[in-house]
Amino acid sequence: MSDFFNNYFNIKKIAGEKREYKRQMTRVEALPEDYRYVFKKIQNHMWKFASGSGYDMLDVHYDLIELFEEGAAAGKPVLEVTGEDVAAFCDELLRNARTYNEDWRAALNRDIRDKLEKSDG
């Protein structure tokens, strides 16, 4: 329960995260137009899967900003960085983030395990 309060009601933490998010979004605005467009499309797509406080998703976004900055600095087209299948690229990014899919899968397995354990007992 203390994790819940630390993540959702810690005003200092929330304010700090908000400041950091704004700094990161300033970096996005400095990217070339095609990179900004793809970043924002990926960001909107990935937030649909965010779970819990969403802090895991922020880390993924910050890593993506860094990757895009490197690609832009090297003069690469954005789809050379992501690949043509941007949805698959997103799936790969989400692999290490906590998502609702993960929560739903865990709930399904837990519910089945609990029910079957009760019937065995």
Image (tube, helix red, strand yellow):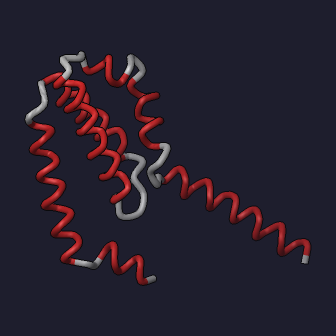
Residue plotted at (36% across, 42% down)? 46
Q: Quadrant of the N terminus?
A: bottom left
Q: Is residue 31 left or right of residue 105?
A: left
Residue 89 location, x and y as percent?
42, 30
Give above or below for 110 relative to 75: below
Give above or below for 59 relative to 45: below
Q: Is residue 85 left or right of residue 77?
A: right
98 or 71, nearer to the observer? 71
Quadrant of the image occupied by residue 83: top left
Q: Is residue 65 left or right of residue 54?
A: left
Q: Quadrant of the C terminus?
A: bottom right
Q: Is residue 27 left or right of residue 93?
A: left
Give above or below for 14 relative to 58: below
Residue plotted at (19% across, 76% down)? 12
Residue plotted at (46% across, 28% down)? 88
Quadrant of the image occupied by residue 108: bottom right
Quadrant of the image occupied by residue 31: top left
Residue 118 location, x and y as percent?
83, 75
Residue farthest along the bottom direction in this orientation: 2
| Number of marks in picture | 0
Residue 63 location, x and y as percent?
30, 43
Residue plotted at (23% across, 72% down)? 13
